[in-house]
Image (cartoon, rainbow, N blue to C red):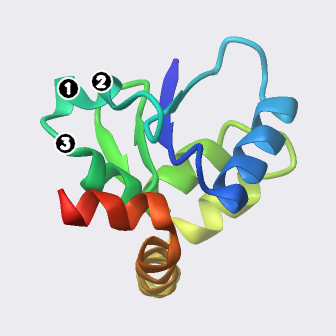
Amino acid sequence: MIAVYYDGKCGLCSKEIRYYQQIAPQGTFVWYDIASHPHHLEPFNLSQEQALRRLHALTKEGSLVVGVDAFCTIWRELSGWRWLGMVVSLPVIRQCAQLGYNWFADYRFAKLPHCQILLKD
């Protein structure tokens, strides 16, 4: 199974993950809301702050992937989305997508109150 670590307190993130959960084949994914349950991060030596900044996924092979690579891992398992996972994985497209995703993820992190609380601790 693929483990997905997402920000369950982010409205956009939660909505997207709920959609994926509805269309995902049974037994393909396990979903962890790390905003509410950060203990799931312990095996990876990741702080909650690090994990909330970017989507993370643990592949079937046991590799931890982050950001665009995590999305591609999810998309390749979803009917109707496989093509996007393959296309975005192509070298130049992946680099451009990673730049855009990183910009958006940093912007999102800076705007969400529950993320900012972590910076003050």
In this rendering, would 42 be left or right of 32?
left
Q: CA distance from mark 3 to mark 2?
A: 10 Å
The residue sitting at the top extreme is 27
Q: How many marks?
A: 3
Label 3, secondary structure: give it: loop
The residue tagged 3 is 46
Q: Position of residue 12 (x, y in %)?
A: 71, 61
The amino acid marked with disc number 1 is: Glu
Position of residue 40 relative to residue 48, above or below, is above
Residue at the spot x=56%, y=54% of the render? 72
The residue tagged 1 is 42
Residue at the spot x=19%, y=42% of the render? 46
Residue 110 is drawn in which quadrant?
Answer: bottom left
Q: Residues within 10 Å of mark 1 (few under 14, many from 20)?
A: few
Q: Tags 1 and 2 in contact by the CB under 8 Å rule?
A: yes
Residue at the spot x=26%, y=55% of the render? 50
Position of residue 27 relative to residue 89, above or below, is above
Q: CA distance from mark 1 to mark 2?
A: 6 Å
Report the disc number at residue 80.
none
Residue at the spot x=18%, y=33% of the render? 44
Q: Residues within 10 Å of mark 3 (few under 14, many from 20)?
A: some
Q: Position of residue 40 (x, y in %)?
A: 34, 24
Q: CA distance from mark 3 to mark 1?
A: 7 Å
Name the foreground residue: 92 vs 119: 119
The amino acid marked with disc number 3 is: Leu
Q: Position of residue 23 (x, y in %)?
A: 86, 34
Q: Residues within 10 Å of mark 2 (few under 14, many from 20)?
A: few
In this rendering, would 53 be left or right of 70?
left
Judged by depth in the image, the label closer to the viewer, 3 or 2, is: 2
The amino acid marked with disc number 2 is: His
The residue tagged 2 is 39
